[in-house]
Amino acid sequence: MRKVLMMLLAAAILGSAAGGGEARTVRFVVPRALECMDDMAIWSADHLGYFKEEGIVFQMEQAFGTTDIRMIATGQADFGYPSPNLILASIEAGLPVKAVCAADAINIFGMAVRADSGIKAWSDLKGRTIALGDAAWATIAAPTVSAAGLDPDRDIEYIVAGDSRYQMVNEKKIDALFTWISEFEQLKGQGFDFIYLDGNQVLPVLANPVITNNALIAKDPGLITRYTRAMMKGLYFVYKNPEAGADIVLNKFPAIQITWEGALGCAYGRNQQAFGTDDATARQILGDGIGYMAPKKWDEVIYWAEKVGVISKPIPPADVFTNDLLDLKWDRARVEADAAKYVCTSQVYKDAHR
């Protein structure tokens, strides 16, 4: 009897591929336009049929402002990947959400400055202006800025510049750009002469995880495992073939205006976010299992969130994240084969290889 019960429990947690059952529509929400290079791992998983194999019909939807977490909390969407600070603030406010899978295994956030700006280190940002895309980004930046030795409320001035923030920094109207690795790599590929101040060097934590709502965790844990398994296959596919990941997005969204060099730069940045910027970190992540969230990194995230006032008191880690629904043992050979045989067909790729 005990053996049978254990088998049933394992099936519920690990989930299974679609079989003959009815497909389940899964809604993934992002707080920005859908035509974005950053989501190449997810679009790769969709393109290659990894979601379909798990009995999932994938849909990505756009939220507006910072409504993505509220949509997930209320069941209007199933998954998303907001920043840890916004997650913690939402949990403290009573929203029933939890992180279930790593998407960015390191601190992806940093600052980009013009190469001729004279800014060479975080300390050089004191008294400077920082361009944000949205006012809420100040909350995301605060722990890294503080860990770098600056007072985020007194030492710097944030300017919400929206979609013009790259150009405003490039035109010397704002001193620095709050950004992240894949975006910075994309900007380099598009010709911006920027240098990067790496936030992971001053605060080596994790960044945006996949979240869902607590009701779904209780009701259908197998769906969470199936979804995250497919998404992690997409991450690994892009890791093994960055060109393919870029090409898949460019084929899906041909209106994206970018050079092949810029698209590939974004793919390299996406890989650094998921697997680290050095071989040792990549080996650790691959060894732990793609998607695993290191508890010590979450402890640091919670500590710094309280320190800078994102939350008023520490939140128990068990209320914030769980690794229990992850399948960390899926076979990578099939994804490696898919990556090896992919042939790029996008117009941007063809134009760059004439």
Image: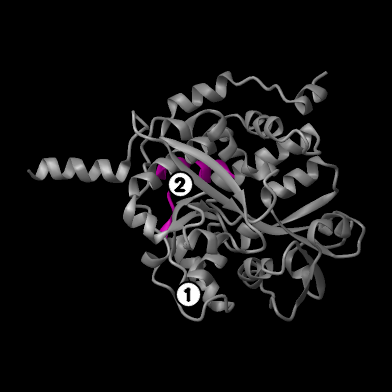
Identify the residue at the far left of this view.
1
Q: Residue 181: x percent and y percent?
A: 67, 50
Drawn side of residue 170 relative to residue 94, left or right: right
Q: CA distance from mark 1 to mark 2?
A: 24 Å
**Residue 10 quadrant:** top left
The one nearer the camera, 121 or 303, is 303
Q: Residue 90: x percent and y percent?
A: 52, 70
Q: Residue 134: x percent and y percent?
A: 72, 65
Q: Specify the label residue 92 is tagged with.
A: 1
| Dot 1 amino acid type | Glu
The one nearer the camera, 283 or 352, is 352
Q: Does residue 335 sit above or below 207 in this rendering?
A: above
In which quadrant of the rendered image does the C terminus lie?
top right
Drawn side of residue 72 relative to residue 251, left or right: left
User: Which stretch did the figure color magenta?
Assistant: 276-295
Q: Kindly identify which residue carries mark 2.
A: 291
- Name the residue located 86 percent from the left edge and 59 percent from the top edge: 169
Drawn side of residue 88 relative to residue 124, left or right: left
Q: Which badge, 1 or 2, is on the more N-terminal residue?
A: 1
Identify the residue at the far front of this view.
22
Q: Residues within 10 Å of mark 2 (few under 14, many from 20)?
A: many
Q: Specify the label residue 4 is tagged with.
A: none
Q: Identify the secondary structure beneath mark 1.
A: helix
In which quadrant of the rendered image does the N terminus lie?
top left
| Dot 2 amino acid type | Gly
- Name the residue located 41 percent from the left edge and 35 percent from the top edge: 55
